[in-house]
């Protein structure tokens, strides 16, 4: 019996030990591999990379002047920076100094200007405008017409900090551009981004003081007729508070800062021809003698108010035909900014206009730029219609741009010497 | 129904007042003591041989019984003792030495056939736990003892809310498992399941617990698809005296969930036999503790009521939805905001596209609060019950009983619910006779301040800061002050600043969360309380469930008249549910919903050739809204040797769709759960605005889903078992194997409907809503399994028990959510001693439990549950001279190895307690 007791005791001890041992290894709940968190790079940031390159010492000095060195070297962030080398900076400084400094001056002169004279706010604005918060190698810029707009570090509305000033790289052949300036080198890699070199400084858009397309048109003495045409086209239309984000008024559209438009603005002479022609042909069709008709038409065309003699729908159609558009979002909207360099040098290339919003199949406006090297030396547009009406399409004389790439915050304006007619 | 109750009360009192005592000639008495320990033996049956007359010893072992003449032979019996016969010739008190026995299998069970029989002769699998087993079990609450029974799975929602089942299909709140307390259906009428032991018996009043495994509708009616648990209280005629049990314990000792906290469990029972005809009892129990917590902060991908655990956390996944984090179920694809920006802002489109912000869903969730921050940690359970017992005749006893309880606990349904001040009362009047019984009872439920923690927290987030402002028609009208606008704008801005997506997410969330009230702050508490106290129907979280159940049932044994042919038992019942949630749970905004069920059964059993006992049962039930159901049962018990029986049974069970499955109308997360009642089809215009299968919509190929009429779910089960006593009755072996087949399995399907009525909008996430509707799966689901148990009585009062069970689900159709939730294998091993050491006053028990890993499926969350191992242990010291006092030191989950058995449920740690019981027997 005693032996049995021992057996029992040992058995029980073994059982108890086993129980405790077994129960001491409960598994934790099933876990999954952790989702990786960012591993930040090491090395030189964008600012440090430039600082290490003597060809960019002027630009580096401007970064220092702007107080953005640490920001651009932040390795937790990623940037694309459009910078210019010392040659480009010399062009910029020369212009910024009003010609007081010339490209032939010694480097310390430039450095002195950048470090002491260039307003800090200007330096900040330039660098912020040329900085994108994402890494875009040159190859990653898509090449749609007219360019690849992307937001910069300039915040336009602090209450909505994603509302930012755009910059417009354009990957092309043989030249690539940022806005209107050619890129002369690409893909200088930094630990936290990439640097592309522009011919000179790409100036921010005129956001402060604010210049809109409406501002440009209203303050241009050669566009008083075009301003009147817009007013005539807007007759009876609802403004900014009306339907849609811009209302239905061209005037409101062109004054809304957050648009991105290309306006082909006929100068006064071109508009006078249009008014004359329409009034004259109308009077003739009414049986008015040619002399009387010509005199009357001349009188009407002598004033921008002459547009009031034209039907609203006609003027509206004409104005719409002078605003380029895209259907990137499924319907034609005035949301492209075509600088002169973005137009093709080849003949027969078309750009869509707001007329396509009503007539989707309309071929648009034929545009052609003439380049000398990377720079545009001539720009012309041809409408579908002819003046007087009835001629062969696109066979008449083109409307030549008398000036181009007039910058507004919300678009670009090219002044042309003839009115384009959509039909 | 109230009329019926009144009639029953009147009938009872008429009997009490008019029936007089039977004349007796002499009174004999004496005292019964344990021959080993000399301890008074209470609740021992004293029966006068050759008659039905008898009594029980009181808590001091004393008894008195009137006899017509002397001498008489007394039959002395009690579980755990050898039956004795004592001849009494005079009125001098007799001293009886009652000899304990180590023989097993002596218990009498009732549940198997609704008639008393030895457990060895049960024709179906049954487990029984008596008061003695509870006393020696290393559990903190008597209900936990069920956990260690063979083949039982338990889902633990909280300290006080555990849901057992057998043979699979377990969940927090099991609608396939019946729980009867003193014959009453213990389910909360509005919930359709029993809330553990929150309402019912208190520990000192438990006489026994019987567990029928598997299908059991044939005798107990609809619902017992997976088993029936019957708890029976102590009769005050038998169990008398004042008993007190005080348990004081400690939990959270490792401070893993919260600081160490106390566990209080106080029980008092007083039973008094006033006379041979009248007895009463009153008992109460209080549990007060800091509850276990749901601390599963893993990420969850939710689609309607299905989903899975996925990688990621609050930092790495902007759409993080923590399982036990609430409020973060609100999720929106913020691409719409980016698309708007891209369309109108020069330069933004290309930046947005370059960052892929429009290419794939950009789902972002609101910031949530953890369960720990939200739920009141105090779990309190207070129960009080009492009954009056009157013997109308020697054999007929009338009982008037009331059970009432209230408690705070946590429940996991489709969301996580805090049951706060939940109350339920059960009141019955009953007449009992060995040959018949009649019982009327009612269950009165009051959800108190119970609320949906998930919904409340989401609404709290909305009250603090709107996700997206909408107009009266529900169309988005975003404002800069909206959380998602702030997040999306900030996120885009941060990306434009050059941040990584990860950093931008953190910064944007921090920005949108500026001013977010900290949990526990006065701002938080005031606002949160205001929402949780507002009814769900009024955009709050409060559940206003005051549903009731009224029931009457009777059983009659025809055996006295049919004995020559067979033992025949018949019975019938009627139930009436009154669903009243005031629109917070059911579609009952316009008034309470009445639902009636009635049924009847007949059972015949016959002994054949002295070796075979054949029992045939049949039951018919009818419920409002559904056709009648017939459930047969056939059992056979073959006696292969003395105390060695082979059992064979074919059982069926079914359940009508629960009240919730018929009438629920509840928004859960992004999904509305609706019932099967045809009124929903009209209300939601399924005919004019069809439902589409959610999966097909999400796959881009919308398929119309037409809800079909929902039918009751049914199961048929075959079982073969053996129960035998070996080794001089010291070894009890119980083995079973079963095979079950479910058909018309009740489940849900996630559908999507447009909010506009325009079919084309089904592809537009902003113009559609999720609706979950009940359905019967056309596929048959099969289960099979086995169980084997050994119970061995060793010398010197040692006992060893072990069991192993297995449940398997088979032929599950692809994508079918069965909610089986049973581990393939589970085992319990226990070792104990009821008396060793000096004067055999020491005792101990240690129980090891292991269950296999399983994949848990629930409406709240799905996921893998690791295998669970626990050790419970207790050591006790008896003070026989202090009126059967016991000091016990015990622990559940001794090694404090946290475990959980349902995704999203509380993590259970160790509970260490010391208890002192006075007059425990």
Image (spheres, coloured by chain):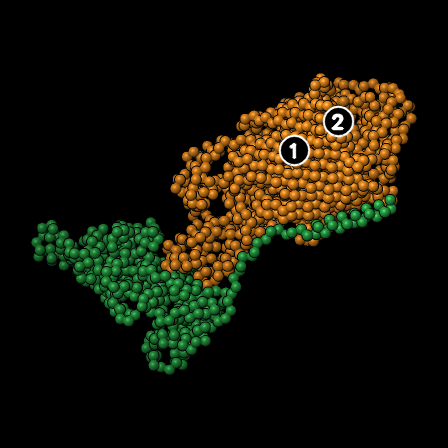
Chain colours: A green, B orange
Return the residue at label 1.
Answer: B719
Residue at 51 percent across and 65 percent down: it is A40
| Residue B690 sits in quarter | top left
Residue A93, image x, y percentages: 36, 75
Identify the mark at residue B389; answer none if there is no mark: 2
Between discs 2 and 1, the one toward the N terminus: 2
What SS does tag 1 mark? Answer: strand
Residue at 50 percent across and 71 percent down: it is A43
In the rendered structure, the residue with mark 2 lies on which chain?
Answer: B
User: On screen, A17 above or below A105?
Assistant: above
Identify the mark at residue A95; answer none if there is no mark: none
User: On screen, A199 above or below B191?
Assistant: below
Local packing at callout 1 (Cα closer than 10 Å; few below 14, some 14-19, many 20+) is many
| Residue A354 sits in quarter | bottom left
What SS does tag 2 mark? Answer: strand
Residue B278 shows up from this direction: yes
Residue A213, image x, y percentages: 30, 61
- Specify whether A47 is left or right of B911: left
Residue A12, image x, y percentages: 79, 47
**Could you say which is closer to the camera, residue A264 or residue A183?**
A183
- Specify whether B697 is left or right of B260: left
Could you tell me which quadrant the N terminus of chain A lies in?
A: top right
Residue B231 shows up from this direction: no
- CB-based contact (under 8 Å), mark 2 and mark 1: no
Residue A126, image x, y percentages: 39, 69
Q: Nearer the viewer, mark 2 or mark 1?
A: 1
Local packing at callout 2 (Cα closer than 10 Å; few below 14, some 14-19, many 20+) is many
- Specify whether B629 is left or right of B346: right
């Amino acid at each position: 019996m005693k032996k049995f007791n021992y057996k029992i005791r040992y058995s029980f001890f073994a059982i108890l030990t086993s129980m405790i041992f077994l129960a001491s290894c409960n598994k934790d709940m099933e876990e999954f591999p952790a989702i990786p968190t960012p591993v930040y790079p090491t090395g030189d940031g964008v600012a440090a990379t430039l600082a290490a390159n003597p060809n960019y010492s002027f630009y580096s000095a401007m970064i220092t002047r702007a107080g953005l060195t640490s920001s651009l070297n932040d390795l937790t962030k990623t940037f694309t920076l459009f910078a210019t080398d010392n040659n480009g900076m010399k062009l910029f400084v020369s212009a910024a100094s009003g010609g007081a400094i010339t490209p032939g001056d010694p480097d310390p002169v430039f450095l002195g200007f950048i470090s002491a004279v260039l307003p800090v706010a200007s330096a900040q604005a330039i660098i912020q405008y040329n900085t994108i918060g994402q890494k875009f190698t040159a190859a990653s810029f898509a090449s749609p017409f007219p360019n690849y707009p992307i937001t910069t570090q300039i915040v336009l509305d602090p209450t909505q900090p994603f509302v930012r000033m755009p910059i417009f790289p354009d990957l092309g052949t043989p030249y690539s551009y940022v806005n209107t300036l050619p890129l002369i080198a690409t893909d200088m890699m930094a630990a936290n981004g990439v640097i592309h070199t522009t011919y000179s400084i790409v100036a921010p858009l005129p956001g402060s003081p604010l210049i809109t397309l409406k501002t440009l048109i209203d303050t241009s003495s050669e566009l008083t007729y075009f301003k009147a045409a817009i007013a005539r086209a807007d007759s009876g239309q609802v403004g900014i508070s009306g339907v849609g984000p811009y209302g239905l008024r061209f005037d409101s559209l062109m004054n809304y800062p957050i648009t991105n438009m290309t306006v082909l603005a006929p100068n006064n002479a071109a508009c006078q021809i249009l008014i004359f022609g329409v009034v004259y042909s109308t009077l003739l069709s009414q049986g008015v003698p040619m002399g009387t008709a010509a005199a009357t038409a001349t009188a009407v065309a002598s004033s921008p108010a002459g547009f009031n003699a034209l039907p609203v729908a006609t003027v509206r159609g004409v104005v719409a035909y002078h605003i380029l558009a895209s259907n990137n979002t499924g319907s034609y909207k005035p949301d492209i900014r075509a600088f002169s360099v973005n137009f093709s040098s080849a003949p027969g290339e078309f750009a869509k206009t707001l007329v396509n919003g009503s007539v989707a199949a309309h071929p648009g406006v034929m545009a052609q730029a003439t380049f000398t090297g990377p720079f545009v030396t001539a720009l012309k547009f041809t409408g579908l219609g002819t003046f007087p009406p009835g001629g062969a399409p696109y066979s008449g004389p083109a409307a030549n741009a008398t000036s181009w790439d007039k910058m507004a915050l919300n678009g670009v304006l090219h002044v042309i010497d003839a009115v384009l007619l959509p039909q | 129904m109230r009329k019926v109750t009144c009639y029953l009360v009147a009938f009872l009192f008429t009997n009490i007042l008019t029936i007089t005592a039977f004349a007796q000639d002499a009174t004999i008495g004496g005292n019964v003591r344990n021959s080993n320990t000399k301890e008074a033996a209470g609740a021992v049956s004293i029966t006068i041989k050759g008659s039905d007359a008898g009594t029980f010893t009181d808590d001091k072992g004393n008894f008195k019984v009137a006899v017509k003449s002397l001498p008489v032979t007394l039959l002395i019996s009690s579980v755990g003792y050898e039956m004795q016969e004592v001849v009494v010739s005079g009125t001098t008190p007799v001293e009886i030495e009652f000899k304990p026995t180590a023989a097993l299998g002596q218990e009498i069970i009732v549940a198997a056939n609704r008639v008393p029989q030895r457990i060895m002769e049960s024709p179906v699998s049954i487990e029984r736990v008596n008061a003695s087993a509870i006393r020696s079990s290393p559990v903190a609450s008597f209900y936990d003892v069920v956990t260690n029974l063979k083949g039982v799975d338990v889902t633990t929602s909280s300290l006080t809310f555990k849901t057992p089942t057998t043979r699979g299909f377990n969940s927090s709140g099991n609608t396939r498992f019946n729980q009867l307390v003193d014959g009453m259906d213990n389910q909360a009428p509005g919930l359709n399941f029993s809330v553990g032991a929150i309402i019912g018996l208190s520990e000192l009043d438990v006489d026994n617990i019987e567990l029928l495994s598997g299908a059991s509708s044939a005798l107990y009616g609809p619902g017992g698809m997976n088993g029936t648990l019957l708890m029976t209280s102590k009769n005050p005629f038998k169990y008398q005296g004042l008993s007190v049990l005080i348990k004081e314990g400690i939990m959270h000792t490792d401070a893993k969930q919260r600081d160490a906290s106390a566990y209080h469990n106080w029980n008092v029972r007083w039973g008094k036999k006033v006379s041979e005809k009248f007895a009463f009892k009153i008992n109460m129990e209080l549990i007060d503790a800091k509850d276990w917590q749901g601390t599963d902060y893993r990420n969850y991908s939710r689609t309607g009521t299905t989903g899975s655990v996925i990688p990621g956390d609050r930092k790495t996944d902007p759409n993080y939805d923590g399982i036990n984090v609430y409020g973060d179920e609100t999720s929106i694809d913020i691409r719409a905001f980016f698309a708007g920006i891209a369309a109108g802002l020069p330069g933004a489109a290309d930046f947005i596209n370059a960052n892929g912000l429009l290419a794939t869903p950009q789902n972002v969730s609101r910031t949530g609060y953890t369960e720990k921050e939200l739920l009141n940690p105090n779990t309190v359970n207070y129960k009080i019950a009492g009954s009056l017992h009157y013997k109308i005749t020697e054999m007929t006893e009338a009982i008037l009983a009331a059970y009432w309880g209230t408690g705070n606990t946590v429940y996991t349904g489709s969301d996580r619910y805090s049951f706060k001040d939940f109350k339920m009362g059960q009141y019955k009047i009953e007449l009992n006779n060995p040959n018949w019984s009649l019982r009327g009872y009612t269950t009165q439920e009051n959800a108190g301040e119970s609320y949906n923690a998930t919904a409340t927290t989401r609404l709290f987030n909305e009250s603090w800061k709107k996700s997206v402002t909408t107009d009266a028609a529900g169309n988005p009208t975003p404002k800069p002050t909206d959380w998602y606008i702030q997040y999306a704008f900030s996120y885009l801005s941060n990306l434009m600043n050059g941040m990584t997506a990860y950093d931008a997410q953190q910064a944007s969330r921090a920005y949108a969360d500026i001013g977010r009230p900290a949990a526990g702050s006065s701002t938080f508490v005031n606002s949160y309380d205001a929402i949780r106290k507002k009814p769900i129907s009024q955009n709050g979280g409060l559940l206003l469930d005051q549903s009731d159940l009224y029931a009457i049932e009777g059983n009659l044994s025809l055996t006295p008249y049919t004995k020559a042919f067979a033992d025949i038992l018949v019975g019938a019942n009627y139930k009436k549910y009154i669903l009243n949630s005031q629109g917070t749970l059911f579609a009952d905004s316009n008034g309470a919903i009445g639902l009636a069920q009635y049924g009847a059964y007949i059972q015949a059993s016959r002994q054949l050739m002295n070796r075979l006992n054949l029992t045939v049962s049949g039951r018919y039930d009818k419920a409002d809204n559904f056709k009648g159901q017939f459930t047969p049962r056939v059992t056979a018990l073959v006696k292969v040797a003395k105390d060695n029986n082979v059992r064979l049974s074919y059982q069926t069970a079914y359940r009508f769709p629960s009240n919730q499955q018929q009438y629920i109308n509840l928004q859960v997360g992004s999904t509305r759960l609706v019932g099967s009642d045809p009124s929903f089809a009209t209300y939601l215009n399924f005919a004019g605005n069809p439902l589409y299968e959610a999966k097909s919509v999400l796959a881009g190929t919308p398929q119309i889903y037409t809800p079909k009429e929902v039918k009751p779910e049914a199961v048929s089960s075959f079982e073969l078992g053996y129960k035998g006593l070996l080794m001089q009755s010291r070894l009890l072996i119980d083995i079973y194997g079963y095979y079950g087949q479910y058909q018309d399995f009740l489940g849900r399907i996630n559908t999507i409907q447009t909010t506009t009525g325009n079919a084309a909008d089904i592809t537009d996430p902003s113009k559609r809503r999720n609706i979950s509707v009940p359905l019967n799966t056309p596929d048959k689901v099969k289960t099979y399994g086995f169980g084997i148990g050994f119970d061995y009585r060793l010398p010197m009062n040692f006992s060893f028990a072990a069991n192993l069970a297995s449940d398997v689900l088979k032929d599950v159709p692809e994508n079918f959510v069965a909610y089986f939730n049973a581990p393939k294998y589970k085992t319990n091993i226990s070792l104990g001693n009821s008396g060793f050491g000096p004067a055999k006053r020491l005792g101990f028990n240690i129980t090891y439990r292991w269950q296999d890993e399983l994949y848990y499926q629930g409406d709240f969350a799905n996921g893998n549950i690791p295998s669970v191992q626990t050790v419970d242990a207790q050591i006790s010291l008896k003070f026989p001279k202090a009126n059967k006092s016991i000091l016990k030191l015990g622990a559940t989950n001794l090694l404090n190895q946290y475990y959980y058995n349902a995704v999203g449920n509380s993590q259970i740690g160790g509970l260490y307690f010391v208890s002192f019981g006075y007059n425990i027997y």
